[in-house]
Image (cartoon, rainbow, N blue to C red):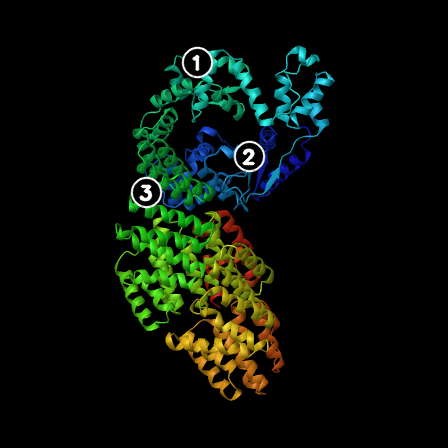
Amino acid sequence: MQGRGEERRHIERILADAHRGEGGAQLLHGEAGIGKTTLLEHAAAHAEGMRVLRVEGIESEMELAFGGLHQLFLPVLDLLDRLPGPQAGALRAVFGLSDEAVRDRLTLGLATLSLLSEAAAERPLLCLVDDLQWLDQPSVDALSFAARRLQTEGIAMLFATRDTSPASGAKALPRLHVTGIDRQSAAMLLPGLAPPVAERIIAQAQGNPLALQELAAALTPAQRAGQLGPLALPDAQSALPSRLQDTFAEQVRHLPEATQRMLTVAAADDTGDLSTVLGAAGRLGGETKDLEPAERAGLIFVSAQRLRFRHPLIRFAAYQQAPLAWRLAVHQALVTVLDGSRHAHRRAWHLAAAATGPDEQIAAELERVAEWAGSRQAMASASAAYERAAHLTADTQKCARRLINAAQKASEAGQDERCRALTDQVPQPLRDPGMAADFARVRSVVELGYGSPGQAARILTECADSVSADRPDKLAPLLTDAIHAAFCAGDAALMTEIGARTPHLPILAVPAQLLANDIARARQTLDALMLAGRLTSNGIMNQLMTGIYCQLIAHHEAAHELATTAVAHCREQGIGGWLPTALHLHAQAELALGRHNDAQAHATEALRLADYYELDHRAAHLRALSAVLAAVRGEEELARELAALALDYTRPRDVGRGTADALWALGLLDLGLGRAQAALEHLEAARQAAGHPLLARHLLPDVIEAAVRAGHPERAKEPATQLTTWAADLPQSHLAAQAHHCAALTSPDAQAEKHYVAALTLHASGGDFDRARTELLYGEWLRRSRRKLDARDHLRTAMKLFTKLDAQPWARRACTELQAAGETPDATEAAHSPIGRLSSQEREVVRLAATGATNREIATQLFLSPRTVGHHLYRAFPKLGISSRTELADLLAS
């Protein structure tokens, strides 16, 4: 541990935090041999009173789904029964202990967090994950999911990885760069060397501790004494990992040939099981005694049941230095040993490794492995199996189908660059129109998620034109996906063009009719579409688009009902990739209905999911929506940060809908804080970004109020007229209320009051936020009209409603107006509600606890451990002035 004082202190601080009941994680990254494993060993040596679980990534196991997770949890599998049923079932399935399918990898992430928490129940837990870059992707996803959610579990997690980009899922972990040690520390690791030799070794190793040791160990006695030649240590400095690899390879080559062959078997095996290694080696003439020279050289460690290489690079060297014919024979021998259904996926991979050319039988076995991995939500492993199957496929069209499947699974795993690479490999042209349609949908998913939604829509429409005659059954899904992409882009012209292609399909006719201002016909078509959706099992995209259409015509109750159904469908069927989109629609409908707390809860959950699945496109939309909700609450720094993050993504990619929502958030924030001119600029820019008047309808009340307050009533006239027209065409009471509210702002004083009264009458069945804003405006108008006594009732109501909604800027405005009307309000009541004393995480936990949810149920929904949920409740109760869960519902209702 020479020269590692800072790293040691960092690790020891994390261990101390775990002893105090706090959770923490750290990703150590640096080049091979730099000392990451030694730092993990240091952590293990100082983990007094802690339970230690560890796993080491193995390159040959990278494509074996959940191999790393199984290795880590092997000592604590007896704790599975303590987990909630679905979570325990998910882990049993991925560990091969049951034949169940796993439909949602989120369940696996939660199960991993819960099992870690159970393992830490009696004493703190240290989790060590070495060589993360060689751990299978599903295990990385599950462990990093848990690591990002450690709070009060008394768990320390340390990951070590090569100095490359962290595996998907580990990118958000706190990172500590492990660099080379200084010259003085390096010299202390080289006792007994002649000074010139030590200087040459230090120069070659470049501060890498393992390189220092291995290069010194490779010297002959004469060289150690100072007799160096140019071939022993060449003057030209090579890349250190290659130099280090050469050193390991040389050590392997000095072993007896029988031992080298035995090490090749051990390196090719991915189980570490001694009986498997010996069984395969026995078929090739190997014996147990052949391992002894490697043991004596310190290259491997052997126990009664396990065989482990001292360093992963030794394993790599042992495999790479073996001739090709021997490696092929080794894999064939392992195939004969790994029999039975339990090892079917390993057999398939060894068969693939032994193949020297196309082999349909092996390709079919790998395809079955891919289906097995996909059923357990191990999408990265499924994708790898499909890809290898494709490479073993001689038939061009079969190869294309398997590559398309591989690309689809890679996309679902969040591997966007790999998905692009796979689509580039698909041989063209595709003779099967159905396969061409599937290929277009994969390309569009990647384009929508990481590129331009407009381009995604064009990919789909072009494909629809080419396959419509041969595969009319593919037309509806292709064009429905295209409509969705065009909607995200805010491209009304493209939406109209797509809808006009198939006017006989209601799901595509509605937007064309709406955008052509044929409102009456669009409503009739939408009613028929909604009825059909209730009578048949509508696809998830149809449900979502129908909900979006309901939003466009201000039928928010129907949109909410459809979104609720879509969310339930995604949860029940394990469609994790679509769940953030369904929750987004749910939250939007709740915001429109004035249910701000519910909207916040669902938007927060959706953003967590989008980040987890690496759905950058959806995350940008959700950050914009979250910015709107933060703007209502007056959380200026958060609202601006979220809006800026959303705009950084949406503007370069022409995601018009997301850009409009982010600008709406900035406008609403400034409007609430009394910055009317700035609000007007943002809101007018949002209207323009939305792309069509109908797509910007929800912005009109804010645009009109901002224009009037900024002293530009002429800029309110056109949007006010348009809002009145929409209210007439779309008979919804809350929309009519908004129209009267805005008419009051733009009308002469003689007509204003009748509009305020009409708006408040219509608001009776609507959301509290819209009603409170009308009460505030009416109260302000009454006070300016010198009717202070009448004004006070409305301003008092507005202040109470805003306070209940935690809309602090608006509550302060109502409070100020009430004071100007001659009443001294309770400032404490206006500024703080009991729920406002809680942190955002405590607020979410309390909201769910008030519904009667258990700690485990809350933990599942919020991606926490049950222990963390209990900790939040313990801290929240004193702030709320209560002592039990039974008091929560009454408190929140009040």
Position in image of residue 726 (x %, y %): 41, 75
Mark 2 or mark 3, which has the lower sequence index?
A: 2
Measured as percent of width and height from the top left, residue 734 is found at 42, 74
Residue identified by numbered label 3: 430
Q: Quadrant of the N terminus?
A: top right
Which residue is tagged 1? 288
Q: Secondary structure at mark 3?
A: loop
SS assignment at label 1 = helix
The local crowd at label 1, few if under 14, some if 14 to 19, many if 20 or more residues have their Cα within 10 Å, is some
Which residue corresponds to the image point at 41% horizontal and 45% vertical from the top-left? Answer: 412
User: Does residue 304 appear in the picture of this structure?
Assistant: no
Residue toward you, 728 or 25: 728
Q: Position of residue 509 (x, y in %)?
A: 32, 64
The tag earlier along the polypeptide, 3 or 1, is: 1
Examine the rendered structure and indicate whether residue 54 appears above or below residue 580.
above
Task: Please state which amino acid type lies under the numbered disc 3.
Answer: Leu
- Can residue 722 be seen by looking at this rendering? yes
- Estimate the spatial distance between the alpha carbons at disc 1 and disc 2, rounded to whole Å: 33 Å
| Horizontal relation, residue 162 to residue 538: left or right | right
Marks 2 & 3, CB-CB < 8 Å contact: no
Nearer the observer: mark 3 or 1; the answer is 3
Q: Which mark is residue 755?
A: none
Q: Quadrant of residue 35?
A: top right
Say what amino acid the circle numbered 2 marks.
Answer: Thr
Observer-nearest of 831 and 890: 831
Give the residue pinned by disc 2: 161
In the image, 142 versus 29, the foreground residue is: 29
The amino acid beneath tag 1 is: Thr
Q: Earlier in the sequence, mark 1 or mark 2?
A: 2
- At numbered mark 2, what does the secondary structure look like: helix, strand or loop? strand
**Disc 2 versus disc 3: distance between alpha carbons?**
40 Å
